[in-house]
Amino acid sequence: MQEFGIILSLFLLMFFAYKGFSVILFAPVFALLAASLAGLPLMPAYTELFMAKGVTYIKSYFPVFLLGAVFGKVMEDTGLAKGISQWIINSLGKERAILSVVLAGAVLTYGGVSLFVVVFAVYPFASALFKQADIPKRLVPGAIALGAFTFTMDSFPGTPQIQNIIPTNYFGTTIYAAPISGLLGGLIILFLGVAWMEHRRRSALAAGEGYGNHTLNEPEGTVTVGLPSWYIGVIPLLTVLAINFFLNNIYTWNPDLLQPFQAMKLPLLVASVKNVTSNWSLIIALVCGILVAVALSLGRISMENLAKTLNAGAVGSLLAIMNTASEVGYGNVISSLPGFKAISNALINIKIGGTPLVSEAVTVNILAGITGSASGGMSIALELFAKDWLAWANSTGISPEMLHRVASMASGGMDTLPQNGAVITLLAVCGLTHRDSYMDIFIMTIIKTATVFIIILFHSITGLL
């Protein structure tokens, strides 16, 4: 009965998320359903189990969500992000339309702009270019997803996206963990993804299919006049990357910084400075990036509009962090139920290759798919199993860096199932439906998922990180 309750709860959460219901509201509902079927009293399960981990997650990552959202909103509203997109797309031209859209999304996400902002920044230029090149509009979401939701989100070392930050808190690594594996994996995804999209373009051309007649969310005369030059727009991105790199790899953090706070016996204090230096580094880097972006745009944005931009970014971050925290709270309730032991034993006992890497990849992928969230699914998995995987890795000579990279890349695998919020937003912005364009996004999902296991095989053969 307990196992049935867990499975029923997971199915209902996935179904309601797919239908567009907020996980902030329904994650606790279905968590408590599973708890009640397991015989646990409801109110303690809610306040002491669900809320406890949700609050811990907010404590750890809210500054990153907040500053990332504000940075992205500033880049969007000042036209800096669109200026970069326009230059990349215009430079490569309609002959390389798909590659130009992919690279535009990749540059922005690797520079720290949030995935959702990238969709809004790239779409107008992508649709205009596809129309000029007479490529079916239904291929636009796949190209944007490849550029924004894949290799620069979780594969390339140093990416400041949250999917690359979360593992640092569990494994004591940095965002540059396993650079060879991450770079190789990212390039495989890029190559295979572009090859697929080009195959789709050629098939459409052979069938005589062009851009098509569309009226929903069609950009009318995409505004390109007055946008900042690309070399102005990249300055804030380079600022984030440079400061983040310096603080992660060159600057030496004082290991005694936490001592005054340890004496206060704070309940949520981390064990060591090394567990939070990646967070601290990104927080400082994003603050600097925001200041630089605002300084470069003072002549183009009024104080009133600046206030609206900053406020919109701050408010937008609340929805993102609360969605993910609710999923983490849900995972905490499920993992505490007696019936979950059989499930956890099955996942942790996947011993293919004799290391924890396959177990980790499968677990993170499954939970990311169920929750429809890369960061939420990975957070649940690491909260449940990180200590076991780390102990297993230490006993088999596997570096924590490899655990980090596999977790990060696996989170970006099955997360893009139909109920994923970013997928739904992307299709809505493009004025298309799942029936029109989801096939290409799903192929990206398959490529991402398969690449994780290619990287594990590569590491097992070469030992390279």
Image (cartoon, helix red, strand yellow):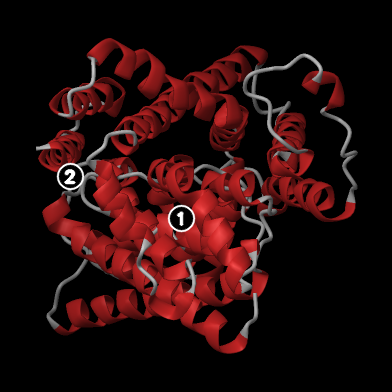
The residue furthest bottom is 461
Q: Which residue is mark 1?
A: 148
- From the viewer's perspective, is residue 395 above or below residue 116? below
Residue type at numbered disc 1:
Ala
Q: Amino acid at mark 2?
A: Thr
Q: Quadrant of residue 227?
A: top right
**Whole-percent x and y of residue 304?**
61, 12
Report the front residue among 199 and 410. Answer: 410
Q: Which mark is residue 211?
A: none
Say what secondary structure mark 1 lies in. helix
The N terminus, quarter of image: top left
Q: State how far apart marks 1 and 2 are (Cα).
A: 25 Å
Residue for badge 2: 215
Which is more toward the observer, 57 or 150? Answer: 57
Q: Is residue 45 above or below residue 63?
A: above
What residue is at 62 percent from the left and 43 percent from the top?
Answer: 169
Q: Is residue 402 visible?
A: no
Q: How many marks?
A: 2
